[in-house]
Image: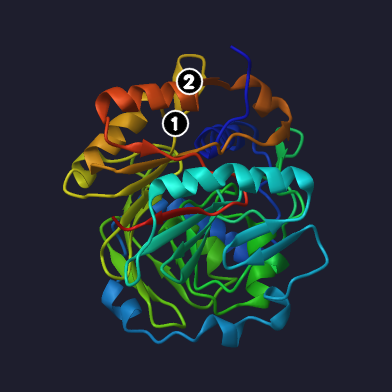
Amino acid sequence: MVASLPSGGAKATFLRRFRLVYGAPRHNTGLTPSSREHSQAQATMAVHCNSVLFSCKTWRNRATNPISAILPTRLFSVPQTPFSFHSDGLKLSTCRWDRVVSAVVSEESAVGSSSSGTDEYKLTYLEGNSWLWDVSGVRILVDPILVGSLDFGIPWLYDAAKKFLKNFKLSDLPQVDCLLITQSLDDHCHLKTLKPLSEMSPELRVISTPNAKPLLDPLFKNVTYLEPGQDCEIEAGNGSKVRIQATAGPVLGPPWQRPENGYLVISPQGQLTLYYEPHCVYNKNFLEKERADIVITPVIKQLLPNFTLVSGQEEAVQLAKLLRAKYIVPMKNGDLDSKGLLASIIRSEGTVESFKELLSKELPDAQALEPTPGVPLQIPAP
């Protein structure tokens, strides 16, 4: 099979092991030497995963400022670029993208139409692991990579850029209410993006895995670190509230290390729940008591010889069955322009089409909805 680009879990696992063997330098964080030493110490102390738990109630009761009062005007202005963001989605000026927008209208209509007073999700895929979610007016930016490329600080080993949204930048973002981080490595916690974002909005509400604490604490002032099972609320300027609960994701390191996070996102009126974990790695015992109407997951496996780095296909189907999902949104987080050694040694197994075939047999009432980069995928409550 032709070698293909690895997704986040593949790169993260490989690069962590690579650094342990060869001592390759980490990505330049822009932190002071003392901050870097603190970061390394915190990483070493990750083995003490039960030492500190963060109280959700403390954060839930903490007042937050409206984002519009925090972020400078330039974050919300529409610059002279090929992209401009509207409440309906990313309006793309090229003829090629006009055709793409037209192509998804029928898919959005097929999902159903929203009636007044019901919850609704608008899911805009920004390529890689990045998303912009509008949950009944609450806007959540997920694992953004919007500045520079993705190279983990080792560009000769791996260097990737987006295929479609090449010119979409931080300044093109609409007003956001929360930044959501699933993992501590660069393909999720991208410091080239987060540092300028924090300079524009140091008090932006952030929800993250505790594994990213050494990276986020120097940048943002209002960070909630959730352990699996903990939850908190996000409130938008319009008064809408969304509840976010952390779930257990992959362990990127020794087996005793704290897992990274997945998330359950519950809409304001509780009519829709979304589950997101970008590597199709989950704790079955933890999730079997949960339900999710929408599941966002990779469906294409990423493999090294005799070793599975990122799950998909059958595992993605079983995840959808476990959560009794109505809609599955397959991620193509490996579909990037990449170069370097790492991009050539990992192969993929399965396709979105083969996943759909498996899904139709195991969960015939569920729908697989493929996102188009930059185009909101609208999912209203039933």
Name the residue beneath numbered marker 2.
Answer: 350
* Quarter of the image with the N terminus in it: top right
Q: Residue at x 35, y 43 (%)?
A: 327
Q: Are marks 2 and 1 in contact (CB under 8 Å)?
A: yes
Q: Is residue 253 visible?
A: yes
Q: Residue at x 66, y 27 (%)?
A: 343
SS for tag 1? loop
Earlier sequence position, callout 2 versus callout 1 = 1
> Type of residue at label 2?
Gly
Which one is in front, 41 or 221? 221
Residue 339, image quadrant: top right
Q: Is residue 274 above or below residue 2?
A: below
Which one is in front, 365 or 243? 365
Q: Is residue 104 above or below residue 216?
A: above
SS for tag 2? loop
Q: Residue at x 62, y 52 (%)?
A: 374
Mark 1 packing: few (<14 Cα in 10 Å), some, or many (20+)? many
Q: Residue furthest right?
A: 80
> Type of residue at label 1?
Val
**Percent of width and height locating residue 24:** 68, 39
**Percent of width and height locating residue 206:** 48, 69
Tell me the tag on residue 337.
none
Q: Residue at x 79, y 57 (%)?
A: 82
Spatial CA span between label 2 and label 1: 8 Å
